Image: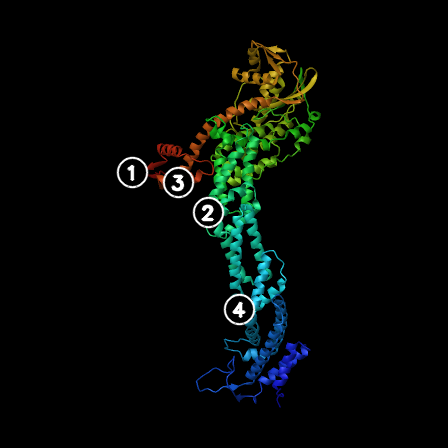
Amino acid sequence: MGPLVPTIEEILKGLDCMYRRENIGPGLWMNQHQLIYNYCNSTSMATPLAPPTMIQATPIESPHKTYVETPCHRIYSKFEDYITNYCEEVSEKLLEFKAEQLLEAYCREWSDYRFSSNVMHSTADYLNRHYFQGSKEVKSMFHMTLVIWQKSIIDFFQDQLIGAVLEAIQAAREGQKSIIDNRFIAEFLRSLVEMEIYEEFFEIDFLKTTQEFYTLEIQNLLNSNVSGREYLQKIHQRIQEEQIRTQLCLHGGTWTPLSNLLLQIMVRDQLTFIHSNFEALLDAQADLELKILYDLCSKVPNSLKSLYGALETYIKKYAEDSLTPLDPRDHQTYVRTLLDIIDRFQSIIDCSFSMDPYFLKALDSAAMVFVNENPVISKFPKNQRPMKSYDLIAKFCDGMMRKGSKIEGEIEMEETQRKVRFGPFFIVPEGENVVLSEVSCSEELKNVVQKPRFCRNSIKLLEYLHDKDIFLKIYTKHFARRLINGQSASEEAETSFIAKLTEEFGCEYTFRLQKMVQDTQISKDLSSGFKDQKSEASRATKIEFGIQVLSTGTWPSFQLINLNLPRDLMTTVEGFSEFYNRKFSGRKLSWVHTQSRGELTSMAFKGKKYVFGVTTPQMVIMMLFNEQLSYSPEKLREASGMDQKSAQIVLGSLAKSGILKIEDSEDEVCLNLNYSNKKVRVDLSRITVDAQETKETEAVQKVVDENRTFIISAAIVRIMKMRKQSTHQNLMTELIDQLKTRFKPKVELIKKCIGIMIEKEYIRRNEKDRDIYEYRA
C-alpha cells in the first residue's frame, strides 16, 4: 500500500505558514517537502484541463492536443494564485507610506518575501527538478515569485521607488544628508538585480542624471577660474565618491559605464585645460595632483602624448635656471645640483607617473642635454668646455671617495710614528709607484672605514655623458692618486663603485681600474715581505715605509725625474731594488719620485712643532736646509739633482706655502723662520698636485683621441671578421651602435679608421662596388 495522498489544502496551509513566517522550522520544512513529493507522485490526480497560464505541463504537439492537469501543474497553479494574492496585500500596505518612507517599507517587505520564497523554493525541490524543464518564461519556483513580485510591486511603484533613490543620490552629491539610508538603496537595487531588471529600470536613468549633474558642475567649476591643482583635487574627490557609492549601493557592473562617463565629462572634454596646467603643477611640486593627472589621462587614449614633450622641455628649462647661478669652480655644488635635478624628476616619474617609459625617455633626453652642455660649462673658456663636465664629475667622485678631513684630524697618529732626525726635520717617507711609500699611521687608522655618501644616481649621471671614455680617463688619474697616497675612504666603496661601472658599461670599461686594485694588493704583500727580510743596517734607520709596484700600461703615465735622495732613503731604495730583482727577473723598476709622499716633523719655526706632508722632491729640498738656512737656486738644483723646470716647480710650491722665502733678486732662497700656521699638520704636497691636475686635464683629450682610434679600428676588424662583407652604411651603423656605450664616435674619425684598416690590409673595397667592404682573412 502506497503513501497517503495529501490534499492541496494541506500543502497550501504549509505555504501560508511560510509566508506568514509562523512556526517555520525543520519540522515544517520536512513535512511540506514530503507532502509535495507525495502529491506530485500520485497517479489518481490527473484530469483533463486547459493549459496553465504561465507554464505548459506538456509541450504542444498539434493544434488538437488536449492538455492534462498533472499534480505538479495543480500545485504550481495553486502556489501562483496564493503568491499573487500575497503580493497584492503587500502592495496595499505600501500604499500607506509616503515617498521618503516607501523605500524602507519596500525593503522590509522584500526581505520577508525573499526569505519565504527561498524556503518555499527549497521545499518544492521536486517541482524544480521535474516540472520546469524546457520552460523559457519561468525557470524555478523562486523565479516565479520574482516574476509575480515585479508585476505586482515594481511595475506599480517604479516611479516612486526609482525617484526616491535618485533623489537620495543627488542629495549626497550636493552634500546634503539624505533621510534614506544607503542600506535601503543597496537592498532595493539588489532586488532589481535579482529580478534581472536593474539596467532597464535603474541604470539608464542613473547614468542620465549623473551626466546632467556633472556636466553642470564642471562648467560652473571652470567658470569660477579654478586652478589646475584645485580642479584635479575636485574631480579626484568626485570620482572616489562615485566609486565608493558604487561599492556600497550599486551593482558592480555599473562602475564601467559610470567611470567612462565621468572620464568623458571631467577629463576627455577638459584636456586642453588640464594640459595647460601641467607646468604649473611641476613648479608647485604637486606630486599628488600629478599622479591624479596621470592616472586619469592614462585612461583616455592619446591624452598623454603632448605631456611627454612638455616634461622634456620643462626639465631643460628647470636645469638651466638651477645651474645658471652656480660658481663653475665649485664642482661639489655643480654635481650635487645635477643629481638633485635628476633625483627630483626621477622621483616624480616613479611616484606620480608610475615609471611610464615615455616619461623616463623624456627625462633621459633632457638629461643628455643639460649634463653635457649647461650654463656652468659655458662659463669656461671655449677650448675647455668639451671636457669640463667630465672633469667636474670626476672631481666630485674623487671627493666622495677620499678620506674626510675630520677623520684625519681626530686620529692621533704621532704616538706610533718612528722618526729619524736630520736637523730641524724628521723624516717619515711615504713612497709609491715603486718608490718609498711609508705608511706612517697607527693600526687604529687602518681600521677606520668611512663610506662615502654617494647619491644613488651617480652611475645614472655617468650614463648621460656623451663620451664616457673621457670621464674614465680623468677618473682613473684621481683613482690612481688615491690608491698611491692611501687616501681612499673605504676600499669597500671603491670596489663597489667599480662593480657598478662594470655592471653598467662592461668589463672592458673597468679593466684598468680592476688591475690597479690588484696591483695595490700585490704591493702590500711585497712591502710586507721586504720589511721582514731587510737587513739590520736597514732596520737601524727607523724609517717607516711602504712601497707600491705599479704595472706599466695599466696606471697613468707619471713624470720621471732625477733626484738625489738622502742617505737613509737611498739605502731603502737600493735595498728594495735588490729584493725585487731577486724575486722577479727581467723586470725593470722606474722610481717615480714625483708621486712619492712623506712626512717631515720640524721644531725650527719659533719652537712650534709642525708635521709637514710633502712630496719626495719637496722633502729633498727641505732636508737641505738642515745644513744651512739659505741657498742660491742653482745650488739647490745641483744638490737635489733635479732639472731646472722641476726644481722651479718645487721651489715655487714651497715659497707659495711660506716655508721658503725667495729674495727679490731671486738669487737667494732662505728658510722662512717666521713661518706660522694654526694647524699642526700641514699638507704641502697639495699645492703641487693642483698645478699638475690642470695640465693633466688639458692633455687628456689628445690621449683619448689616440685611444679611440685603436678602439674603433678594433671594432671594425671585429665586425668585418664576423660579417665578411658589409656596405659602408651598415658598417657605420653597427660601429656607432657598438661604441655608443663608451663614447659618441665622430663620423670623420670612423672614416679615418676605415682608411687605416684599408692601408693595413685588414679590409678592402669590392672591385665591382666601391661602397662594399670585404674582410681580408
The mark closer to the camera, 3 or 2, is 2
- The reply, left or right, for residue 129 in relation to residue 448 is left
- Earlier in the chain: of badge 4 and badge 3, it is 4
**Is 469 situated above or below 63?**
above
Marks 2 and 4 close (CB-CB < 8 Å): no
> Which residue matches tag 3?
733
Residue 195: image location, x then y, percent: 55, 70
| Amino acid type, residue under disc 1 in the picture | Glu
> Which residue matches tag 1?
767
The mark closer to the camera, 2 or 4, is 4
Marks 3 and 1 close (CB-CB < 8 Å): no
| Amino acid type, residue under disc 3 in the picture | Thr
- The reply, left or right, for residue 604 in relation to residue 73 is right
Cα distance, mark 1 to mark 2? Answer: 50 Å
- Residue 269 visible from this viewpoint: yes
- Earlier in the chain: of badge 3 and badge 1, it is 3
Residue 510: image location, x then y, percent: 52, 36
- Earlier in the chain: of badge 2 and badge 4, it is 4
- Earlier in the chain: of badge 1 and badge 4, it is 4
Cα distance, mark 4 to mark 3? Answer: 65 Å
Q: Which mark is residue 498?
A: none
Single out the residue that lies furthest toward the left.
Answer: 768
